[in-house]
Image (cartoon, helix red, strand yellow):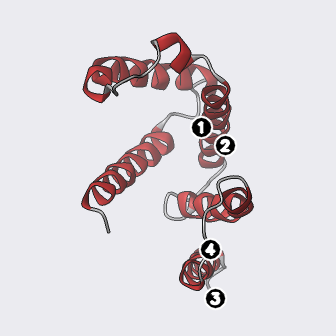
Amino acid sequence: MNKTLLCFLIVAAVGNAIYHFGQKSIPASANPMVALMGAYAVAFILAAISAPFFRTAGAPVWTAQVFNAPVVIVGVGILLIEIGFLSAYRVGGSLQWSGVAVNAAAAVMLLPVALIVFRETFSPVRFAGLALCLVGLWLLVRKSS
């Protein structure tokens, strides 16, 4: 595997773990939308500080990068993810398997998009990986006897 890709996947995994810990720790008395505004204010400030380190040659002016359909789509997805996890944790969702369950379900939902829209390949090895994810999900959510 490409070392740069591996590095970024590790960053994403660490961020995911921090995210779930934080989400589960938000008090039930907090207004979920106000909590999200605070979280995104912190993310905005960190992104603004980090932006100069991620410049790309020939990138359009910042307004064209911020105000476009894919960014709006990501924003809608973020809101749904955030409110979904926050609400799930408030009604007793498990820190052990909630993230796994959502990621496995998303992988299944994204399969046709990846194949049709982005023309990604789907090999027997990837099928086996997806099947193992689903088996793992089933093992995580089934009731212990």
Q: Is residue 39 above or below residue 118?
A: above
Other-residue count near label 2 (Cα within 10 Å), few / some / many at <14 / 14–19 / ≥20? few
> Disc 1 marks which residue?
82
Other-residue count near label 1 (Cα within 10 Å), few / some / many at <14 / 14–19 / ≥20? some
Cα–Cα gap, marks 4 and 3: 36 Å
> Disc 2 marks which residue?
84
Cα–Cα gap, marks 1 and 3: 32 Å
Closest to the observer: 133 or 39? 133
Q: Are marks 4 and 3 in contact (CB under 8 Å)?
A: no
Residue most toward the front? 58
Mark 4 or mark 3, which has the lower sequence index?
A: 4
Q: Which amino acid type is shown beneath numbered disc 4?
A: Phe
Which element carries disc 4, helix, strand or loop?
A: loop
Which numbered tag is attached to residue 122? 4
Which element carries disc 3, helix, strand or loop?
A: loop
Q: Nearer the viewer, mark 2 or mark 4?
A: 4
Q: Nearer the viewer, mark 2 or mark 3?
A: 2
Mark 2 or mark 3, which has the lower sequence index?
A: 2
Q: Which amino acid type is shown beneath numbered disc 1?
A: Glu
Q: Quadrant of the C terminus?
A: bottom right
Q: Quadrant of the N terminus?
A: bottom left
Cα–Cα gap, marks 2 and 3: 29 Å
> Disc 3 marks which residue?
145
